[in-house]
Image (cartoon, grey):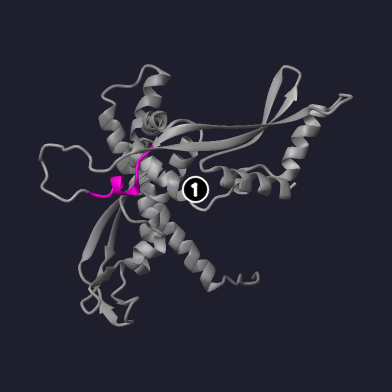
């Protein structure tokens, strides 16, 4: 008779939990297959038809899978019956389950979680939202991150038209502008510029096989751009479905100054780093001083 195998209790529990999750994911995939079958009344003829159908239904699958994993991983939070008020530390009892659907890069994710309300502080909370790191509103951080990456490469109007085609989720240029500004708050030229080592590698690559090193050129320029005050973004108070009135705020033309470092290699101009902001000459000089101090 062979020696008995010793299996840790935690390992057994982990296997059981994974087996349960696999079964739930299989059920979710079967539901998606039913939707796919309804979308295909007859077998597709071309690869383009297959990819188009799967692309249109992809978020229903990936969002559903995410929803199942979240429900399984946070079962304790979903069944929570008590919570402490973050303001007065009173013990609160769970009220009814409150549903919430959030939009992510992988699709909509529906959540059912307990809601707690403190009558003394007049404040409500959902611990599951905090455990998942959700933000206020429907759209979540992964969408905003993708939007910021896009608007740093193309204009806002172009990003607005490209974003739904790339993600399947619409996002207005106004929201993109707001998110990009929030992300950029407090950033300095050193936060967005390549490191000294990266710049030296770029110079070395251009200098390879040359007797003289390339010429580094600094260009400084500015242009007036139209701006509007922060008050223009605030919600308007008044009855809905009324005729639009002329905005009460006044726009302002401001000077956007910036600089760009480039390498001249014959007829080629190789970008090194740039910094353009709505700023005055003093702020522009401070940014240049940061570049100089950083080497």
Q: Position of residue 291 (x, y in %)?
A: 68, 45
Residue 45 appears at what percent x and percent y? 36, 17
Q: Residue at x 25, y 68 (%)?
A: 115
| Range of magenta residues | 227-235
Where in the figure is residue 46, as x and y percent of width and height? 40, 17
Q: Where on the picture, by quarter, is residue 74?
A: bottom left
* Circle count: 1
Pointer 1: what residue? 184
Q: Residue 231 in magenta?
A: yes
User: Is residue 190 placed above or below 56 in the rendered structure?
Assistant: below
Q: In terms of secondary structure, where does tag 1 sit?
A: helix
Q: Residue furthest right?
A: 211
Q: Position of residue 36 (x, y in %)?
A: 31, 33
- Camera-side residue of 287 and 29: 287
Where is 194 relative to 1, above or below?
above
Q: Residue lying farthest front? A: 281
Quadrant that contains the N terminus? bottom right
Q: Nearer the viewer, residue 132 or 264?
A: 264
């Amino acid at each position: 008779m062979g020696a008995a195998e010793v299996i840790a209790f935690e390992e057994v529990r982990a296997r059981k939990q994974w087996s349960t999750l696999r079964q739930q994911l299989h059920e979710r995939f079967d539901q998606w297959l039913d939707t796919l079958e309804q979308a295909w009344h007859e077998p597709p003829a071309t690869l383009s038809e297959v990819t188009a159908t799967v692309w249109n239904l992809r978020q229903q699958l990936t969002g559903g899978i995410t929803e199942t994993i979240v429900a399984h991983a946070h079962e304790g939070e979903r069944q929570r019956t008590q919570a402490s008020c973050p303001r007065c530390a009173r013990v609160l009892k769970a009220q009814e389950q409150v549903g919430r659907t959030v939009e992510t890069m992988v699709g909509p994710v529906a959540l059912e979680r307990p809601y707690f309300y403190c009558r003394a502080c007049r404040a409500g909370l959902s611990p599951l939202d905090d455990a998942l790191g959700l933000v206020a509103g429907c759209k979540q951080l992964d969408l905003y991150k993708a939007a910021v990456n896009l608007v740093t490469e193309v204009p806002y109007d172009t990003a607005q038209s490209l974003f739904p085609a790339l993600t399947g989720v619409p996002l207005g240029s106004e929201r993109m502008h707001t998110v990009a500004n929030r992300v950029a708050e407090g950033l300095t030229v050193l936060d967005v510029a390549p490191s000294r080592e990266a710049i030296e590698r770029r110079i070395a690559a251009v200098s390879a096989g040359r007797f003289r090193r390339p010429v580094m050129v600094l260009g400084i320029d500015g242009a007036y751009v139209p701006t509007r005050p922060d008050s223009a973004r605030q919600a308007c108070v008044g009855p809905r479905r009324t005729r639009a009135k002329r905005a009460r705020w006044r726009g302002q033309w401001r000077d956007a100054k910036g600089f760009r470092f480039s390498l001249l290699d014959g007829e080629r101009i190789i970008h090194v780093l740039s910094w353009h902001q709505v700023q005055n000459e003093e702020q522009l000089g401070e940014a240049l001083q940061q570049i100089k101090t950083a080497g």
